[in-house]
Amino acid sequence: MGRKRKLFAVLPTMLTLGNAACGFGSITFAAKVGPEYAGGNHLLVAAMLIFLGMVFDMFDGYAARLANQTSEFGAELDSLCDAISFGVAPAFLMLQFSQEYQSRLLWVIAALFVVCAVLRLARFNVETEEDDSHEHFSGLPSPAAAGTVASFPIAFRGLEEWLQKSEFATNQNMAEWIIPSFKLSLPVITLAVGCLMVSRIHYPHVFNQWFRGNRSRKHVIQLVFTLAAVYLVREMALPLIFCIFAFFAPIQALWKEVGGRWFFKAKQGSH
């Protein structure tokens, strides 16, 4: 019994360290110093390793709670590993993905993303209490921000194949405009999600709501629309889904703020 307990105690730590290894692997592949077999797919592999790190990050906390082995050490270790996988790795991936447009501005955006990720993780550790329900996050979670950035290199391969097969292949000017626009949009997205990480906007904890809470009709509708997006646009569904998750909440908050002020002014004007 004691040996099994020790095994379960080690498992959450190994999962957390697996997250860090994925972050390091992502950086090395993006820098083209990973294993040679990656070939021209180095950015694709780097992006997929960030998503693999997200899988480790989802299950390390769950494994710790299941084994009743949650601790301050585990929380600190998790944040240190997240800083690599969801801070440094996606920022470096963005620089490599947009390397033909390299400038000081892109480097500043990448540095700001890392800084925001570290601040987000530090704030989470300080503000989260043990009895927290973990139903919502204050600010965009760092894995979601990293996933938004990493989804673009994954979708890029599908975009290239689609352009070759579609009617755009006969229109060289259109194809030459779409690809640079797609690449240049990533630094803007990276800066935006970096700012959202340190915001106070509420985001749902998707994993807890789906696997620990009661699934509502809203969750079923979200799943249906997600599957429909995957079926319709395939690889492009990944950045679409992540961007919707990242930007729907701030747009909704802004709409409520502007709409509330307009309603208040309209009500005052009617008196």
Image (spheres, rainbow, N blue to C red):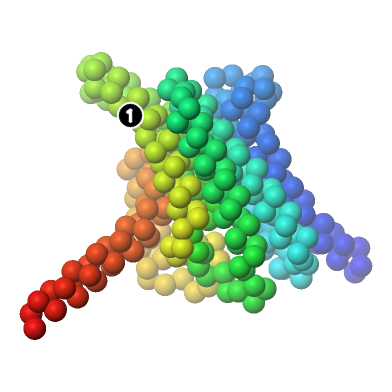
Q: In which quarter of the image is the C terminus?
A: bottom left
Task: Give SS at disc 1.
Answer: helix
Q: Where residue 217 appears, x then y in whole percent?
A: 37, 71
The x, y position of residue 86, in whole percent, is: 59, 45
| Quadrant of res 252 | bottom left
Q: Is residue 147 above or below residue 106?
A: below
Q: Which residue is drawn at 64% across and 53% down?
A: 57
Q: Which residue is drawn at 45% across and 41% down?
A: 190
Viewer can see residue 83: yes
Instruction: Count the marks.
Output: 1
For the residue pair 225 and 98, the one nearer the viewer reads as 98
Q: x, y (%) of residue 22?
A: 66, 40
Mark 1 surroundings: few (<14), some (14-19) or many (≥20) residues within 10 A: few
Report the amino acid beneath label 1.
Answer: Ser
Q: Is residue 52 visible?
A: no
Residue highlighted by disc 1: 181
Q: In this view, does 62 lie to the left or right of 266?
A: right
> As rendered, which of 256 and 166 lies closer to the eye?
256
Give the residue at the far bottom of this rendering. 271
In the visual, does 270 lie left or right of 105? left
Q: Residue at x 54, y 32 (%)?
A: 93
Task: State which quarter of the image contains the N terminus.
Answer: bottom right
Of residues 247 and 233, the one nearer the viewer is 247
Examine the rendered structure and indicate whether residue 126 appears above or below residue 247.
below
**Residue reaching furthest to the left:** 270
For this view, does 48 lie left or right of residue 203?
Answer: right
Residue at 28% x, 23% y is: 177
Q: In this view, does 18 lie above or below 126?
A: above
